[in-house]
Image (tube, rainbow, N blue to C red):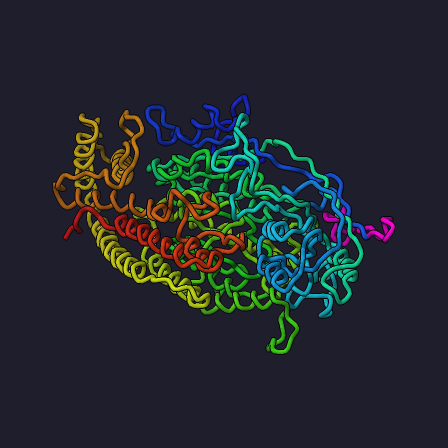
Amino acid sequence: MFLDHFQSELGIAKPEDEPLFDAGSRQSQRAIRGTTTVPRRISKPIAWIDTYYPVLNTGLERKVEILGDDGDVEWSADLEEDQDFADPDAAQYHDAIPAWHGLSKDGDVTGPIIYVKYGRKRDFDSLQESGVDFKGTIALVRYGGVFRGLKVKAAQEAGCIGILIYSDPHDDGAVTVENGYEAWPHGPARNPSSVQRGSVQFISSYPGDPTTPGYPSYKNATRIESTSIPSIPSLPISWNTAKRLLSELGDDLKSKSRIRLLNKVDDKVTPIYNTMAIIPGIVSEQAVIVGNHRDAWVLGAADPTSGTVCMYELVRGLGLLLRDGWTPFRTIILASWDAEEYGLVGSTEWGEDFADWIQAHVVTYLNLDVSVAGSKYNLKGSPSLAHLIMNAAIAVPHPHNSSKTLWDARLEKGPFPLPSSVAGLDLSELVLEKLAEEQAIEQADIPVNPLGSGSDYTVMLQRLGIASTDMGFGTSLTDPVYHYHSIYDSQTYQEKYADPGFQKHVAVARHLGLMTLRISESLILPINTTHYSLELLNYLQKVENLASANTIDVDTSSLRSALNKLVNASLRLDTIKERLSEQVERATEDREKFVNAMLHEIKIWVNRKLGFRPKRFPFRGGEGQEKTFMEVEAFMLAPEHAPALDLYELSMDINDLADATPEDEYSAIMSQIREISIRLGRFEQGFLSETGIKDREWYRHLGVAPGKWLGYGATPFPALSEAITIERNATLAAIEVGRLVTVVETLTSTLTPSMTLTP
């Protein structure tokens, strides 16, 4: 479906043979690398499908039973969700996909259950410190707080033989049956039979195919014994089932009765399909990627279909521009990822496959996952893109209020309010955390939160150092309950509660489209390194607070000094960018002089690099002049090779810049724009460390990463933070401070132009 959409909207002729390629094949490699290699550069839009071969699993047989003293079954849980025809789509498919955990361990275990709150490592540690023995038990825990796979990891490390995870309505905020609301599909509260499926891979260790960490899962790939998947069985269960099991506890943490947990799964190598398209740009050597996954646990009306339809609209809009004669300034890559739900598999395998090309050419990655599930517009991204996100959102109308913008929607709340004062209310720990998060967004100047993990930006940002974004309407504590990964993530829910009229979908598509165009079309990349640098000082303050709270003595003065130098370097670069923008505006009033100046720069670079002169660009009037101008401008912004030159691909390097003195003002302008373009596009990669983060070396970004025991949540300065909070090791913390100082010094060098500002 997506391949057909790419072909029809982007004007791509359908070949006789479907462009379905095995990853690693010549055709697959050519499709990406052919946009930047010459001769035979790909110059028109193309679309194809890449096939990878990861190890995945499917659910077979599942049981949760209470056994009597004689071993007979006294009670057996109904593990399917209810068939209620008030939600006709959910009713039709209520038993189509079993309720199981992706990449869970096959097993049949019996033992007492033990209640461990949210199943966080600190929940297990607290009970162990009080003398609780988990050996031989089955943990019963609530969803929330941390990624579900890390609940399983904590349970197996504590000595449990299995784990059951349920959604507790006490964590739903205001909208509960207890507060007088009817359960879905007759009202906005949680359906007590609903089950949250999902992967239990240890995503903070590494995502993707668990058997090929760090390299792509080709059909003939060498596979390892994975360390990122569980060794004990698990199942997701409903609130109905959890209530019955909780009743077995009485006033105790551990049940006297024995519980059987059976989880039979089919593990096997399974082909997955990434559907890709490329619109080559004038500056073909720089690219922006826009991606969204299309696989769902069941119906997936919000996750991921709401994001998918926004991608559809983006493609439709780009197609209209192409038919009107437009060519993007920078290349645009469109990706429909597969197998995200198992552990970001499709995007991770592709990122590992083309790591060198991505780092050489991709300047940003824009992600969509759930674009509409509730009222509040959640915005996340690399700090360097926060102003891009904000300014684009300000330019998009609010979906329901003409006096507001989409940016205002970040403060929206649902229609079912909490009491004006929550003092004295019996609120769960998770609800209190969510309240604190909402208050922090209200108080922040630019509430664009950093990215941890949980969607397809992970490989781009955390491993390859590509500035990334993610956004979508999520639920607040006063929204109807969104039944995540359940049969009730349905079209009926979307039409009744999430987005009646689908105006939120339209707003997200507009926001995504505007961001895409502002990155692809801007002469100077809209990457704000000063905001990022200031955010790093905030990260440092948080780490210093952690050190104080954990009584770890860490000297961070050298890091603070390095960060202050980075801020100053970025401010100087901002001045250069501002002056260059003014000079470009003046210079382009005389196109002929500007083109000739850029030709001079080409001549200098090519003679120095290759030892021969470039072909002449014929200077023509009218449309020919405009085309010549754009071709030369493109060369100057990405100087590996010009569209009119028959050269082979050469790497773009910050240190490989023309060292000749500019002949005049126009040459100086383009020389500096070229250099700044390279520096901004590579800034995020300055955070990468080849040795990665301790115990999870797949993650290489020392600025931000998913917390080791969080999974979804972002941890600033992760290696340093975890040396303090997890290792509690002052010596290791000092080493991590030193590593960060080196990183920050590299970033400062990246932002320091080799040329002086043209007066």
Q: Residue furthest top?
A: 16
Judge left or right: residue 60 versus residue 230: right
Q: Quadrant of residue 420?
A: bottom right
**Residue in the foreground of this view, choosing between 221 and 603:** 221
Is residue 488 visible in the rendered image? The answer is no
Type of secondary structure dominating the magenta stretch: loop
Residue 616: % across, % down: 20, 28
Q: In the figure, 497 relative to 623: above or below?
A: below
Toward the viewer: 350 or 103? Answer: 103
- Residue 221 percent coordinates (x, y): 52, 28
Q: Is 111 placed left or right of 282 in the picture?
A: right
Q: Position of residue 407 (x, y in %)?
A: 46, 61
Nearest the viewer among 538 and 96 is: 538
Q: Is residue 397 visible to us here?
A: yes
Please tell me which residue lies in front, 407 or 438: 438
The question of residue 281 being in magenta is answered with no
**Is residue 75 magenta-colored?**
yes
Magenta residues, start to end:
67-92
The N terminus lies in which quarter of the figure? top right
Relative horizontal placement of residue 415, taking residue 344 as reference (left or right): right
Residue 58, given in percent of the width and then of the height, sits at 68, 38
| Residue appearing at x 21%, y 43% in the figure | 670
Residue pushed farthest front?
Answer: 131
In screen coordinates, is 556 left or right of 100?
left
Q: Taking 428 as reference, is 462 above or below it?
A: above
* Residue 55, image quadrant: top right
Position of residue 548 relative to residue 239, above or below, is below
